[in-house]
Amino acid sequence: MTFAATGGRVTRDTLCAGAMATAKKKASAIPAAKLALYEKLIATDPSIERKGATIPYTSSNGKMSTYLSPTGELRMRLPDDERAAFKPYLAMSHAYAEQLGPKTGAKRAATRAGARRPAGRR
C-alpha cells in the first residue's frame, strides 16, 4: 500500500502513526481497589454494560445510570422516592461515628502539637 507523500495528502506513515496513537490506552487515575469494586458491582448484572475507557460509567437509552469519579466515588442516578430511602442511612452513619468516640493517633497528636507553636510562627 503506497500513498503520495506530497501535496498535503495522507501518507502511509501518517496512517500508521495515527493507528498506533489510537491503539494506546490511557491509564485510569482511579484507585485500583475502587475500580475493582466498581467492576465487581457491574458484573452482578450481566444486562448492564460498563462503558468508558478512563472514566467508567453505565448508561441506558443515552442516560447515564452510574459513574465512577476519578477519585473513586460512585455516583448513581436514582428516582426521587428511591433517593429518599438513603436519608435514614445518613443519620445512622452519623450516630455510629459519634458512638466510636474521638479519633486518636498520629494525626490527632500532630494537631495538638501544632496548636502549641511559638508565637512568631502563627
Image: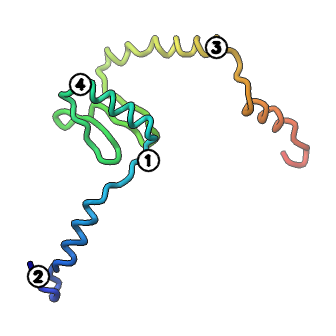
Report which quarter residue 70 is drawn in. Answer: top left
Which residue is identified by label 3? 98
Q: Nearer the viewer, mark 3 or mark 1?
A: 1
Please tell me which of labels 3 and 1 falls first in the chain. Answer: 1
Q: Secondary structure at mark 4?
A: loop
Q: Secondary structure at mark 2?
A: loop
Residue 16 is situated, as x and y percent measured from the top left of the image, at: 21, 72
Q: Position of residue 47 (x, y in %)?
A: 18, 28
Along the polypeptide, which appears first: circle 1 or circle 2? 2
Sequence order check, earlier mark of 3 and 2 = 2
* Disc assigned to residue 3: 2
* Residue 29 badge: 1
The amino acid at mark 3 is Glu
Disc 2 residue type (three-letter): Phe
Which of the 4 image quarters holds residue 65?
A: top left
In the image, what residue type sits under mark 4? Asp
Q: Which residue is mark 4?
A: 45
Quadrant where the C terminus sits is top right
Q: Residues within 10 Å of mark 4 (few under 14, many from 20)?
A: few
Q: Residue furthest front?
A: 1
Residue at mark 2 to residue at mark 4: CA–CA distance: 48 Å
Q: Decide which of 102, 24 is in the foreground and name it.
A: 24
Label 1 crowd bin: few (<14), some (14–19), many (20+), radius 10 Å: few
